[in-house]
Amino acid sequence: MRLFAATLATETNTFSPLPTSLAAYKEGVFFRPGEHPQDSPRMCTAPLFVARRRAAEEGFTLIEGSCFAASPAGTTNRRDYEGMRDEILDQLKAAMPIDGILFGLHGAMVAHGYDDVEGDIIARARAIAGKNCVIGVELDPHCHMTLKRMQASDIIVCYKEYPHTDVVERAEDVLDLVLRTLRGQIKPVMSLYDCRQIQMYPTTEPLMRSFVDQIKGLEGKDGILSVSIVHCFPYADVPENASRVLVIADGDKSKSDRLATRIGEELVSMRGKTMPQLLDVPQAVAAAVASNVAPVVIADPSDNAGGGAPSDNTSILRHLIERNIEGAALGPIWDPIAVRLCFDAGDGAIFPLRFGGKTGPASGTPVDASVTVVGLARDCWQSFGPTKVPLGDCAAIRIGGVEVALITNRSQALGLELFTNLGIDPRTRRLVVVKSTNHFMASFGPIAKRVIYVDADGPLVSDYRKLGYTNVQRPIWPLDAETRPGLIY
Ligand SMILES: [Zn+2]
């Protein structure tokens, strides 16, 4: 039995001012066959990572393809996308005959000329590998579950948790289902329900927590093989941007249709109820300062690099400085030039620095301040579950009572290392501001005595009606009050 595995992934914010080229993949994940590190998966590479570990014991040969992944940003350069795609497809051709394919994709990647990158890759792989090849795909739930990719795949599984702490477990699920199909033990059939809504669904909030736990309980019994809640990725102007429910049953399409419909209808009834309350910036900071527990973690979803934002908006920082807040740490601010200047100034130096507020109108204006360099570190990493995320060279600066973590490789706040690499222990600070929508909860949730979500003025607006979509299929909530949810596959 011969399996092929590869990754090509990013999450594309089509509204982002930051184009994505090959350089962003080289800064992120860029492994040719055999180069993938042994210690942990990187971004979307868990299927290859898991298959490599299990190949010998399960009795199959793994043919490794290339793995390319970039941090979320704007639309990928067309020539760069086609080059990476064709490299993987050429590897697949050279590896034929292949019994099964494992793709670790994101699911919300857009390249110039390709609204549905994953549909394009999977369909081309199907054309090469033939109809009997079993194609299994792992996707991020912040994806566009298009009909094209449903038609070209046998098995698609999304992570269930947001923050995405179950990337490896779901890759194990994909591999299990592919192997069981190849061994003739199951015949997967998929159904897709379209909820006709755009929404975020953190699974750290009580409503989604119980919903996901309930869904997990449905799998592995009564002929149900897998259930995925497709959250959608709101910041993409593509036709099939919508929350959807994907159910895989063993051979019985009417069974997967019924369950997808039941779960889909439940998700429709949760419109507007899954996000935590957002405070404005003065309210959030005042609430944190008035709190008698520490640290209070304030999350800024509006400038989340994980959603393609630049992560250099300065509004909250400016507010902290103007209010003379003591014992505060904020990060990350993406500003490679400012990091370079801090290294040039040296540890302990006090010098005038202009930083942040550069990339686009939603970045605000730069901060000009006399800063003290309080930490410098080369080639830093932060952890996200089992995954290591590169931050590049980093610098910490202090302005009054506020410390700021400046980074070179754009990323959201994921691990405590964002601060501890630079000698800042967030556990001992009164107030910690993190630029992240919800992934920060995996590491910062356990140390936070209280978490406040703030509605700041970064580019990832919380009211999707303000995004100016022109390509998204209508009607869809919250753009339209009346919608027609239903089974579409
Ligand atoms: Zn995601």
Image: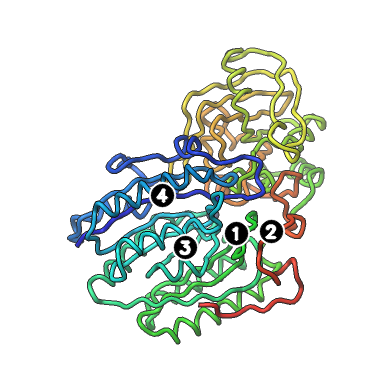
Tell which tag, 4 or 2, sits nearer the viewer.
4
Query: Dot 4 corresponds to which residue?
Result: 85
Residue 327 screen position, x and y as percent: 69, 31
In terms of secondary structure, where does tag 3 sit?
A: strand
Quarter of the rendering containing residue 92: bottom left
Using the image, determine if residue 84 lies above or below residue 472: above
Name the residue beneath numbered marker 1: 202
Amino acid type, residue under disc 2 in the picture: Pro
- Label 2 CB-ligand 1 distance < 8 A: no
The numbered mark, 1 or 4, whose residue comes first in the sequence reads 4
Q: Earlier in the sequence, mark 1 or mark 2?
A: 1
Would you say the residues marked 4 and 2 are in contact, meaning their CB atoms lie under 8 Å apart? no
Label 4 C-beta lies within 8 Å of the nearest ligand 1 atom: no
Q: Which residue is mark 2?
A: 276
Q: Amino acid at mark 3?
A: Cys
Instruction: State the residue in front, 442 or 465.
Output: 465
